[in-house]
């Protein structure tokens, strides 16, 4: 089985071996703010660090209405 | 590919497939480290559990087996001193029992639950049993 994206420490996204039922490996699309949310840290959404100017993909709780 | 409005795509850093490798955003080049499958959780195929066949490896999960030499005496692979593997006459000990471990995808010995390992990161001739490492998968 291939690795899956997992949120670690609420903020960072890495690849890890799949584990059945691990919510940190599950994501949902939020149709209201058009973000991809973590299923474990439900108020955290995917964000490119530094207003999109960094290479790092992370999760943030500071979901901003300026995004949509 | 997961693309944002500026054309950046989700990318496994350095194209290195190891545990805890960071996921980043990069310009699109289309190589495999930028390719992803989106699989809904309720449709995700379960991995085989104890007693079930892992079709990829051709081994049953956690089902003990012997490894028997085809030399005339038909001796069994046995773990000795917790590290080395030799052939010995069958004796019923757990050091002669092996099983396939699904999480690590390794063959483990029943006596100490450590894994087959080729010494020297696979470059040496010696086969031994060693502490299972997440760097292997």
Image (cartoon, coloured by chain):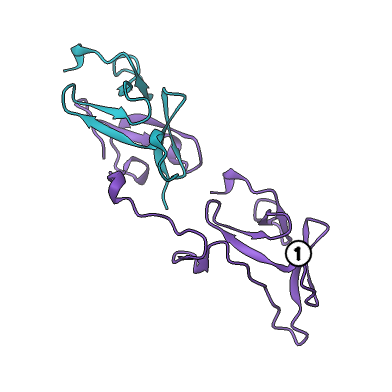
Answer with left or right where residue B69 lies relative to residue B107: right
At numbered mark 1, what does the secondary structure look like: helix, strand or loop?
A: helix
Q: Residue tagged by mark 1?
A: B95
Answer with left or right where residue B43 lies relative to residue B95: left
Instruction: Answer whether residue A48 is visible to the viewer in this image.
Output: yes
Q: Position of residue B131 (x, y in %)?
A: 69, 48
Foreground pick, A37 / B1: A37
Q: Position of residue B87 (x, y in %)?
A: 78, 73
Q: Position of residue B49 (x, y in %)?
A: 48, 58
Which chain is the one coloured cyan? A
Q: Position of residue B70 (x, y in %)?
A: 69, 83
Chain letter for mark 1, please. Answer: B
Foreground pick, B36 / A16: A16
Foreground pick, B13 / B75: B75
How many C-alpha atoms fall within 10 Å of the one at disc 1: few (<14), some, or many (≥20)? many
Instruction: Answer whether residue B37 is visible to the viewer in this image.
Output: no
Which chain is the one coloured purple? B
Foreground pick, A51 / B86: B86
Answer with left or right where residue B11 lies relative to residue B71: left
Q: Is residue A33 above or below residue B90?
A: above
Picture quarter containing residue A34? Answer: top left
Find the residue positioned furthest to the bottom. Answer: B72
How many numbered discs, if any? Answer: 1
Q: Quadrant of the C terminus of chain A?
A: top left
Picture quarter containing residue B109? Answer: bottom right
Q: Is residue B133 above or below residue A37?
A: below
């Amino acid at each position: 089985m291939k690795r899956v994206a997992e949120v670690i420490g609420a903020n960072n996204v890495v690849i890890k071996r799949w584990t059945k039922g691990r919510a940190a490996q599950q994501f949902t699309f939020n149709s209201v703010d058009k973000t991809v949310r973590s299923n474990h840290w439900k108020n955290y959404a995917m964000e490119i660090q530094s207003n999109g100017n960094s290479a790092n993909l992370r999760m943030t709780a500071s979901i901003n209405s300026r995004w949509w | 590919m997961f693309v944002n409005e500026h054309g950046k795509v989700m990318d496994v850093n350095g194209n290195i497939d190891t545990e805890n490798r960071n996921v980043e955003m990069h310009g699109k080049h289309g190589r495999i480290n930028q390719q992803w499958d989106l699989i809904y959780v309720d449709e995700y195929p379960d991995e085989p559990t104890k007693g079930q066949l892992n079709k990829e490896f051709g081994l049953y999960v956690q089902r003990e087996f012997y490894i028997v030499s085809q030399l005339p005496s038909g001796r069994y692979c046995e773990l000795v001193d917790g590290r080395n593997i030799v052939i010995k006459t069958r004796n019923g000990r757990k050091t002669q029992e092996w099983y396939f471990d699904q999480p690590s995808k390794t063959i483990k010995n029943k006596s100490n639950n450590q894994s087959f390992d080729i010494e020297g990161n696979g470059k040496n001739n010696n086969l031994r049993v060693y502490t299972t490492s997440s760097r292997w998968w």
